[in-house]
Amino acid sequence: MSESKVKRALISTCEKTGLAEFARTLHEQGVEILSTGGTARHLQENDIPVKNVSDVTGFPEILGGRVKTLHPKIHGGLLAKRSKNEHMQELAEQKIGPIDMVVVNLYPFEKTVANPDVSIEEALENIDIGGPCMIRAAAKNYPAVAVVTDPDQYELVSEELKENDGAVTEKTRQQLALDAFRRTAQYDQAISGFLAEKEKQEKGFGEKVTFNLKKVQELRYGENPHQQAAFYADALRAPSGVVAAKQLHGKALSYNNIMDMNAAIGMALEFDAPAVTIIKHSNPCGAATDENLAVAYEKALRTDSVSAFGGIVAMNRTVSGSVAELIAKIFTEVVIAPAFSGDALDILTRKKNIRLIEWPTDQPVQEGLEIKAVAGGFLLQDLDVGVENPDDFKMVTKRPPTDLEWQAMVFGWKLCKWVKSNAVIYVNEKQTLGIGAGQMSRVDASKFAIAKAKDAGLSLNSSAVISDAFFPFRDGVDAAAEAGATAVIEPGGSVRDEEVIQAANEHDMAMIFTGRRHFRH
């Protein structure tokens, strides 16, 4: 039977948005409504006739409402195959009425555990048991039963009931069942994910890992036009990071835009002072800080103005009209900031394709997991976020750094973890001077950074050189000294550390070991 008329529905929901209107439609179609606890009261308050589930089962709700619908008179009514005479005869013998629709949304477990201070007791109390059982039973029997799990489905189902004399089409019932199984899978993963996070704190990554993702948007394609792609959010977390960002203007974001945005804003939010970063292919073309944001932009742009063409600009302060005028001079894909002034919007929205993204400063790139696919599997790791405490850095050379050298090293160290490895960058206390990213050799990375600084007409005299991993040989330090650098900051940890330190001492350079590497593959 392709269509079956809904004669009896069971409603039990936590989210009441739109429920009264939907239930009224059911009532107007002659549907008998069964309900429980707070849902029954809500419907009665809206003058919708309701029969309590306990009157159907002949058994009261017990254990403070923990057990309400787990009863043969409910699940028998959901699971009986209407086309099977034995099932229908058995229902009649047991005086069980068929249930043709289930309207259920679950205890708000995801919302509950999004609170970082949630207790384990509170989390457990928000695990729904009866709801998922009813959803799965109804979805299994979708040829006869419609299962509604989201208020967003109310309008569609209401229209079908009105158009089909109280029936829901088989096609819709099948889609509702698919949505239902996705919802219960998502819900179970939310619970297992919460408990797995507790386990990870004690034992590390578990033997099995599942993810709970919700689609944010379809993307035109991935890194290349022949690759399909979509953007998903972590359904267990409150919206944050790129997901919480708001697009104010421009065409839809691409896969590559989103990847670059994450790096661009991640860098900008490393700094308390006004900061600007310019990104191309997830690597910085330049970065700078200055109390005058326009000056910071000009300094960041100067590092590599050629590569900045078609790049992404991020800053941690409101974009003013004067900054917008500078940005508008070259082709820019995306501008990200906490806010845009009216003048800035007037200037930048004249460009049809530029994307303007509002990213609140209280939405940093949060701690979590990074997932990378390899052939046949996945690699998981903690995100490399957070900033080391400079008080923990270790001076290893005879000469300590000057105040300006120290400021430059701290500035550069915040940036280097966002640069693809091997990464060597040259900086002063407020701006990047040369960036060597993604080289196979650390010496080549240094040479490339020096060449970029020379191309930009920037002097490396009295600069600091930053390396995301240790210099394995002294040649990297020798090259930096020859270029004009007077200070070095790197993790340390090489078997040739003493040789590298000796090189720094020979060049009268200050050297700091941080004790932490920042590879970014």
Image (cartoon, helix red, strand yellow):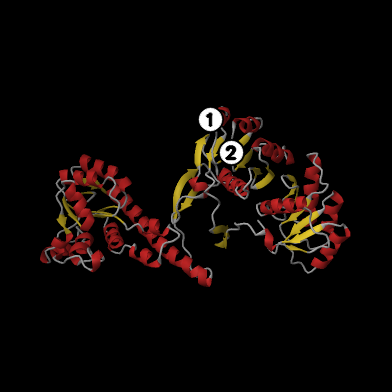
Judge from the rendering whether residue 24 lies leftward or rightward of residue 350; answer left or right. left
Q: Amino acid at mark 2?
A: Val
> Percent from the top left, x then y, of residue 238?
45, 52
Residue at image mark 1: 342
78 is higher (above) or lower (below) than 314: below
Judge from the rendering whether residue 226 lies leftward or rightward of residue 215; answer left or right. right
Residue in front for this viewpoint, 414 or 480: 414
Residue in front for this viewpoint, 375 or 134: 134
Instruction: Kindly state the secondary structure of the residue where label 2 is placed.
Output: strand
Q: Amino acid at mark 1?
A: Gly
> Percent from the top left, x then y, of residue 410?
70, 53
Q: Which quarter of the picture shows residue 275?
A: top right
Q: Nearer the viewer, mark 1 or mark 2?
A: 1
Q: Is residue 100 visible?
A: no
What residue sits 19% from the left and 54% below the top? 40
Q: Is residue 124 visible?
A: yes
Q: For label 2, count other residues whose C-alpha is less than 10 Å away and answer few (under 14), some (14-19) or many (20+).
A: many
Residue at image mark 2: 334
Q: Which quarter of the picture shows residue 85?
A: bottom left
Residue in front for this viewpoint, 470 or 375: 470
Instruction: Kindly state the secondary structure of the residue where label 1 is placed.
Output: helix
In the rendered image, the residue lying farthest to the right is 506
On residue 216, the disc is: none
Judge from the rendering whether residue 382 lies leftward or rightward of residue 290; answer left or right. left
Q: For label 1, count other residues whose C-alpha is less than 10 Å away and answer few (under 14), some (14-19) or many (20+).
A: few
